[in-house]
Image (tube, grey):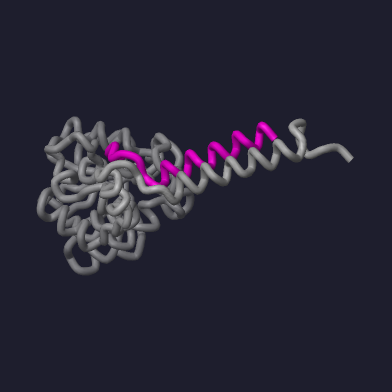
Amino acid sequence: MTPPSRFGWASLTAIFVLFLSLLNIAVASPLLDDHVNKTLAARAKTYITQKTYESYLKKYFPATDRYLFYSGGAKDQVKAFQAKNPGYYYYDDLFTALPEDTSHPWNKEFSDETHEDDGDASSRAIASIAKGQILVFGAIEYKTKGEISFFTKQEIDELHEGLKTGRITSINHMAKGATSPSQVMAKEDHNGVFTWQNGYKAGDKNASGVYGQCKRGLAGCDAPKPNPKSNSGTTKEDVLAATIKGAKLIGKIL
């Protein structure tokens, strides 16, 4: 029978004891400065609710008839439309801000020390207060290819409800590459039925890329990307990650 490592049982025992000692120090010892202790206390975050998002939007972006929606990897179309039509907003304009951008409303209202961003709730919030004529880019196939997209799962039901109550006057699916509000390929009613416009017909497409609830940060997808986190010092998560890394290193030695 061969020994479990080239160091033998005595060395193995010594290394294991050393590892346990380091683990105990890393987890049990108090962190060195008061700032880090405050950071750890702030780790108990609360998720931002849909109602809170709605209040934020009404306060800082009250032109709720100028919200844009998209799916099918069509963020490029939204930006092209905005370039020709200033004053419209889409998800990133409303909710995405770098920590150092102190002028953005997000950083005035929320702190990543105490608030946990929620892509589902924020997406629903936009759709729940949007009013007037709604412009949607790249989503004409949302019922088939986009069944698990954020637009389908979080937004379209709220838009249908808005049609029922009169908050929304029409849901306009825009032609691919549209740069004018008049370039509508289909209008959708509260039951999801399309009425084709301007010579377009069933089977015509308007997506730029893939549909789906893609991994956050993957280019071309419609999943909301969380705000970057500020550099707030060492946390318990950092300590745990370092400990795990050390354990893997010892495993390789053994």
Q: Residue furthest bottom?
A: 165
Residue 200 shows in the view: no
Q: Residue 67: image x %, image y %? A: 20, 48
Magenta region includes residue 242: yes
Relative to 10, is 189 above or below? below
Q: Residue at x 48, y 52 (%)?
A: 144
Q: Residue at x 20, y 60 (%)?
A: 52
Residue sitting nearer the eye, 12 or 249: 12
Relative to 149, is 100 above or below? above
Residue sitting nearer the eye, 133 or 49: 49
Q: Quadrant of residue 101?
A: top left
The magenta region covers 228-254
Quarter of the picture containing the C terminus is top right
| Magenta span: chief secondary structure | helix
Residue 127 shows in the view: yes
Residue sitting nearer the eye, 13 or 56: 13
Q: Is residue 114 left or right of residue 131?
A: right
Q: Residue 196: image x %, image y %? A: 33, 50
Q: Residue 148: image x %, image y %? A: 45, 53
Q: Residue 74: image x %, image y %? A: 35, 38
Total tally of numbered discs in the picture: 0
Q: Residue at x 67, y 32 (%)?
A: 253
Quarter of the picture containing the N terminus is top right
Q: Residue at x 43, y 43 (%)?
A: 239
Residue sitting nearer the eye, 231 or 124: 231
Magenta region includes residue 183: no
Q: Residue furthest right?
A: 1
Q: Is residue 202 left or right of residue 11?
A: left
